[in-house]
Image (tube, rainbow, N blue to C red):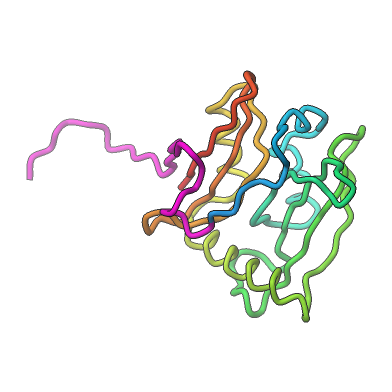
């Protein structure tokens, strides 16, 4: 064994920009539902990191968050907390959606629980919880790393995914020049 004399300190966070979005190497290749004009995001008064901090303080750990257009074409922020913590498996946990208008003076989302017969949301949430449990970092930490890496950028989509056998988060951010970037954080 030869020691190269490098630091023994190891960074546990990996941030990698993936050109063109998630691609086929990601297990969750969903893309944002905001239409072609991302300038709609400039109407938001709450940044994702701040909304996640608020949601976690009121409802516990969060596994997914995204800005999207609602049925009337208005900007909405959806955040998905889990009810019984990250230490409990999906079968015995509870899943929620916090959704609200991110353009007002304060973000005041409404909460709804995913329950039977909503198999689509329950199945995806259960899968997401498992990925978050194995990722070794929280959604809030992942979003914070992208917010720091892209100063002045606006994170608008953060979902759990697996890429090349690594659990992590797929995160879209709009930079100050209006260009969208996709990062995988693990």
Question: Which of the image's four quarters has the N terminus?
Answer: top left
The quarter holding residue 42 reads: top right
Q: Residue furthest left?
A: 1
Magenta region, residue range:
1-28
- The residue lying at 48 percent from left, 56 percent from top is 135
Q: Is residue 85 magenta?
A: no
Q: Where residue 21 appears, x then y in whole percent?
A: 51, 42
Q: In the displayed structure, does residue 7 sit left or right of residue 51? A: left
The quarter holding residue 30 reads: bottom right
Q: Where residue 59 appears, x then y in whole percent?
A: 78, 57
Label count reads: 0
Magenta span dominant secondary structure: loop
- The residue lying at 81 percent from left, 55 percent from top is 98
Q: Nearer the viewer, residue 82 or 87?
A: 82
Q: In the displayed structure, does residue 85 sit left or right of residue 1? A: right
Q: Nearer the viewer, residue 143 or 181?
A: 181
Q: Nearer the viewer, residue 18 or 49?
A: 18
Relative to 167, is 156 above or below? above
Relative to 9, is 39 above or below? above
- The residue lying at 69 percent from left, 36 percent from top is 36
């Amino acid at each position: 064994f030869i020691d190269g004399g490098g630091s023994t300190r190891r960074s546990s966070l990996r941030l990698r920009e993936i050109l063109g979005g998630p691609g086929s190497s990601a297990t969750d290749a969903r893309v944002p539902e905001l239409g072609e004009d991302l300038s709609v995001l400039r109407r938001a008064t709450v940044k994702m990191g701040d909304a996640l901090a608020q949601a976690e303080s009121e409802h516990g750990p969060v596994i997914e968050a995204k800005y999207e257009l609602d049925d009337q074409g208005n900007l909405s922020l959806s955040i998905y907390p889990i009810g019984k913590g990250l230490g409990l498996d999906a079968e015995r946990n509870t899943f929620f959606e916090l959704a609200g208008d991110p353009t007002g003076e304060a973000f005041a989302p409404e909460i709804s629980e995913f329950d039977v017969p909503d198999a689509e949301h329950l199945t995806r949430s259960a899968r997401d919880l498992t990925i978050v449990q194995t990722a070794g970092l929280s959604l809030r930490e992942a979003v914070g790393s992208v917010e720091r890496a892209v100063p002045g950028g606006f994170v608008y989509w953060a979902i759990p995914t697996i890429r090349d056998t690594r659990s992590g988060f797929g995160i879209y951010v709009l930079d100050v020049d209006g260009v969208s970037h996709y990062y995988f954080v693990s």
